[in-house]
Image (tube, rainbow, N blue to C red):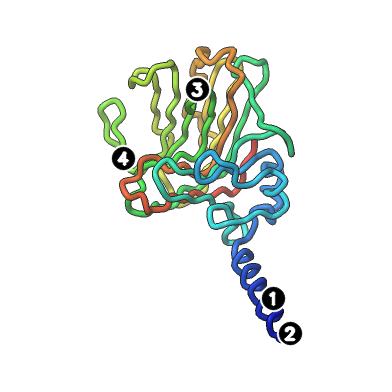
Amino acid sequence: MFFRSNLISFTGVLSLVSAASCYVAPSTNSTLQSVLTRAKLQYPTSELSATSTELYNGFAAAHFQLIEGRYMQLQVAGASRRSELRQMEKFGSEEYWAVDDGETHISKGSIMVPAQEDGIEEVTIMQIHGGPAPILRISWVSSIKIDGTEYEDVIISTIRVGLGSSSDQFIKNVLTERYDAFLTYRIEAVDSKLSIKVDGQTKVDNVDVSFWDGDASNYFKAGAYNNHPSDSSATARVLFNSLSW
């Protein structure tokens, strides 16, 4: 009886290990290791899902895994839910900066937004966050009207240029159509100016963001943020071939 009891227990442990090991850790891709030392994972809200040490040492889950032996996939279901990496000091505390601190702040990612499930309407893939709300969002949208023109299945930038919530406090630009391919997005904030490049082409050029001056609460984020889906059970999904900040 003693042997049988322990055998059952051991089998149960093996089942748990097997379930956990069905996901491959993004840290197994050496290209991603550097950013994982300078990030924490937030899921499904702003709650901590994994520290930089855990990410670097092999954390993996359904919402954060390596697929096809190469690509970091972040996914999440539910309105205003997220699976996002948040900029940190290397294996340290949360990193913060200001647009007028004399430094050049850059985030760069090779990202693919695959065709989304029905019910997914907008997915934010990169951000500059600060204070209570994002200052910059780069997002895929299923459809949007900008300056009277309708667009579908595109990647846009939304830049906050004032403190209010009215539409004139934001600048929206279409950066690119969505492709089933990886595109390189580069965000640069320096001397109170913001620029965005997509595959080396300048899409946003030195936008004045001086109203942020003196606010040393900014930081980069990247991943999948599920904005107001029409079906809360649908899963937003984003793939990264590389990421840095």
Q: Residues within 10 Å of mark 4 (few under 14, many from 20)?
A: few
- The kind of secondary structure element at disc 4 is strand
Closest to the camera, between mark 4 and mark 3, is: 4
Q: Relative to 161, is 221 above or below?
A: below
Residue at image x 67%, y 49%?
A: 55
Residues under numbered marks 3 and 2 in contact, where contact means CB atoms less than 8 Å apart: no
User: Which label was assigned to residue 3?
Assistant: 2
Which residue bears the numbered disc 4?
143
Tell me the amino acid under the disc marked 3. Asp
Residues under numbered marks 2 and 4 in contact, where contact means CB atoms less than 8 Å apart: no
Of labels 1 and 3, earlier in sequence is 1
- The kind of secondary structure element at disc 1 is helix
Residue at image x 73%, y 35%?
A: 92
Q: Mark 4 to mark 1: distance in Å?
A: 52 Å
In the picture, which quadrant includes the N terminus? bottom right
Closest to the camera, between mark 4 and mark 1, is: 1
Which residue bears the numbered disc 3?
205
Q: Residues within 10 Å of mark 3 (few under 14, many from 20)?
A: few
Q: Position of residue 80 (x, y in %)?
A: 42, 40
What is the quadrant of residue 165 in the picture? top left
Q: Mark 2 to mark 4: distance in Å?
A: 62 Å
